[in-house]
Every structure is written in structure tokens, then in C-alpha cells.
């Protein structure tokens, strides 16, 4: 099924900044050490049309992404995958002299595609967590994020703690899911898990949940592009700083090294900042 994604990939920068995308807080490992949620049965990932088998020269690296996560990754009108993550990784690949193919891959089970070899990399606004680092390797961080609460305008919810006994929508298996589990308990029937973040936000629009907790950039983008939904966002001091990384099969140091070198190069020559500014405005 296709998920509703924003028709306007380019959001209002001023608005996004106002909503509070920028976070200057320091990254702490301790802060993101929550337990991983129980996974429901993994949906099979769509097969890549390019083989991920080892082929020395001129190979095309297959990159998995859950493309229902604007502005980081979404599907354009022609089914092409576009977004901040694609712009960053394409620029990295150009520096590293490698070719990429992005393949839309459901979030559920996306990390399994690394171990199985169906994907060489996953770029999907993936938060680097100590738990995930046990089963895969990550690039250097390429983006700072945090959780953000979306509620309807006029909601009596003022802080995260107010969600303790309310119905909260999350994308299954995300860090948003984890923080709500910490508040309500893992088995809380009030945690409503969706296969994509836009589906959770649609449910908030229709009144099926009282709030959604998800990554700040995605919540801010949705609010800016869906004014009719009349959502407002709330930050909470309890939300830990998160950092996105590109994920690799554990032990794939060769590819990890290429990507880290490319990342350092695009940071050094201003390419990263130019991409960032296109999506989020000039860096603070
Ligand atoms: N940053 C969050 C996490 O890593 C959510 C990422 C979801 N990404 C996506 N493309 N759906 O858990």
C-alpha cells in the first residue's frame, strides 16, 4: 500500500525552524540506551532489482530506505525516491566514486536486509543507538534529531508526561516507539503502532489517537505541509538528542570507510551545508 506523503517536499524553512527542528543539545550515549521494542512479524522487503552480490569494479550499491518519511525520504510523482538523505548519500557517493541504487524498503525488517545482503546500506533517518550497534555498523553521524510530539491544536496535552494514559501513535520499532514505551510500559494498549509515520499522523487527524511521537524533522514537515490538519508540536526536555547514521552489515568496514571518507569530504567542502540549507535553512 502507498502511504500518504506530502505533496510539497520543500517546506517553509522559517516555519520549520520555528517549530524547533534545531537542537543544540549534546549527544549522550546513556540517553539513548532504551530497550528495543518487541518486533512484530517482519514484512518481507521488496526485492532489489540490482543484485547486491559482490562484484568488484563498477558495482552498484543497493541502498534501502523507507520512503515515507519526508523530508528525509519520500517518493516523487514518478516513483523516484527523493529527499535529504538521498541528496547527502548521492553527494557522498560522488566523492567516493561509487554508484548507488535506492530501493524503497518497508521499515519493518529493513535492518534484516543488510545481514541478508539484499541491501548494502540503509539510509532512512536511522538513529544510531547502542542496541542497533550490536547488530550492524554505522557511518559517522550525519544529522541531529530529537523526538517531537504532535497533537491537535487545542489539545490539553502540554508535556510528554500528559501522554501517560492517552492513545499515542508511533511508527513501529522506531525511537518514537521506544520513548513512549518508557512512559507507558512496553505492553501498554495505548501505544498504537503504525507501519509508517504518515499513517500515524493520519490517525491523529481522524481522532483515533491523541498524539503522535516521531522525529522532529518529519513532524515539523508534516505540520508545515498539512495546515488543514491543525496540528501543533511540543518539545519535551526528556527527549534525548539523537543522531542519524547510515547503516551497514556488521563488519563491512570497506564500505563504511568509503562512506565516512565521502561524508568528511562533503562536510569539508560545504556540500553538506548547502544540502542542509536547501531543506532546513542555514545552520545555526
Ligand atoms: N529516527 C527514528 C529511528 O531510527 C525513525 C526513523 C524512521 N525512518 C523512516 N524512514 N521511516 O527509529
Image (tube, rainbow, N blue to C red):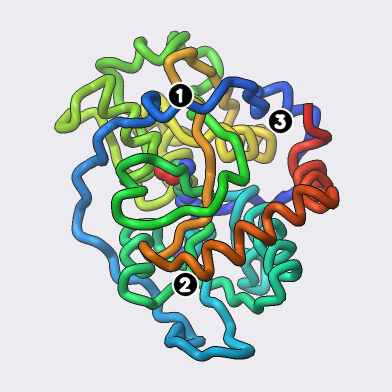
Residue 98: give x, y in percent of width and height: 66, 77
Q: Which mark is residue 195?
A: none
Secondary structure found at label 3: helix
From the viewer's perspective, tell me whether residue 74 is left or right of residue 188: right
Q: Earlier in the sequence, mark 3 or mark 2?
A: 3
Q: Residue at x 19, y 31 (%)?
A: 186
Could you classify mark 2 by the number of other residues whose Cα lies within 10 Å: few (under 14), some (14-19), or many (20 or more)?
A: many
Residue 283: give x, y in percent of width and height: 79, 32
Secondary structure found at label 2: loop
Q: Which mark is residue 240?
A: 1
Q: Residue at x 69, y 70 (%)?
A: 96
Up/down of 100 relative to 233, above or below: below
From the viewer's perspective, tell me whether residue 29 is left or right of residue 50: left
Up/down of 277 relative to 59, above or below: above
From the viewer's perspective, tell me whether residue 47 is left or right of residue 193: right
Nearest the camera: 134 or 63? Answer: 134
Residue that mark 2 sits on:
120
Could you classify mark 3 by the number of other residues whose Cα lies within 10 Å: few (under 14), some (14-19), or many (20 or more)?
A: many
Amino acid at each position: 500500500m502507498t502511504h500518504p506523503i506530502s505533496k510539497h517536499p520543500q517546506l517553509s524553512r522559517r516555519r520549520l525552524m520555528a517549530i524547533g527542528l534545531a537542537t543544540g543539545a549534546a549527544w549522550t550515549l546513556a540517553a539513548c540506551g532504551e530497550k528495543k521494542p518487541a518486533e512484530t512479524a517482519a514484512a518481507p522487503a521488496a526485492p532489489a532489482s540490482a543484485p547486491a552480490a559482490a562484484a568488484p569494479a563498477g558495482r552498484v550499491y543497493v541502498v534501502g530506505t523507507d520512503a515515507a518519511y519526508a523530508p528525509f525520504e519520500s517518493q516523487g510523482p514518478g516513483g523516484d525516491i527523493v529527499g535529504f538523505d538521498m541528496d547527502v548519500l548521492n553527494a557522498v557517493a560522488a566523492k567516493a566514486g561509487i554508484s548507488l541504487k535506492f530501493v524503497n524498503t518497508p521499515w519493518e525488517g529493513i535492518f534484516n536486509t543488510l545481514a541478508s545482503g539484499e541491501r548494502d546500506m540503509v539510509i532512512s533517518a536511522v538513529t544510531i543507538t547502542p542496541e542497533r550497534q550490536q547488530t550492524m555498523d554505522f557511518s559517522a553521524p550525519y544529522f541531529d534529531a530529537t523526538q517531537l510530539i504532535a497533537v491537535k491544536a487545542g489539545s490539553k496535552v502540554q508535556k510528554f508526561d500528559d501522554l501517560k494514559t492517552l492513545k499515542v501513535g508511533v511508527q513501529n520499532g522506531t525511537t518514537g516507539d521506544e520513548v513512549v514505551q518508557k512512559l507507558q510500559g512496553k505492553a501498554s494498549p495505548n501505544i498504537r503502532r503504525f507501519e509508517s509515520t504518515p499513517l500515524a499522523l493520519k490517525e491523529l487527524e481522524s481522532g483515533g489517537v491523541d498524539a503522535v511521537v516521531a522525529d522532529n524533522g518529519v513532524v515539523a514537515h508534516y505540520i508545515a505541509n498539512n495546515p488543514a490538519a491543525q496540528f501543533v508540536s511540543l518539545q519535551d526536555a526528556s527527549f534525548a538528542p539523537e543522531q542519524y547514521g547510515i547503516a551497514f552489515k556488521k563488519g563491512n568496514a570497506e564500505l563504511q570507510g568509503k562512506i565516512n571518507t565521502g561524508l568528511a569530504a562533503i562536510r569539508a567542502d560545504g556540500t553538506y551545508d548547502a544540502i542542509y540549507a536547501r531543506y532546513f535553512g542555514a545552520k545555526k
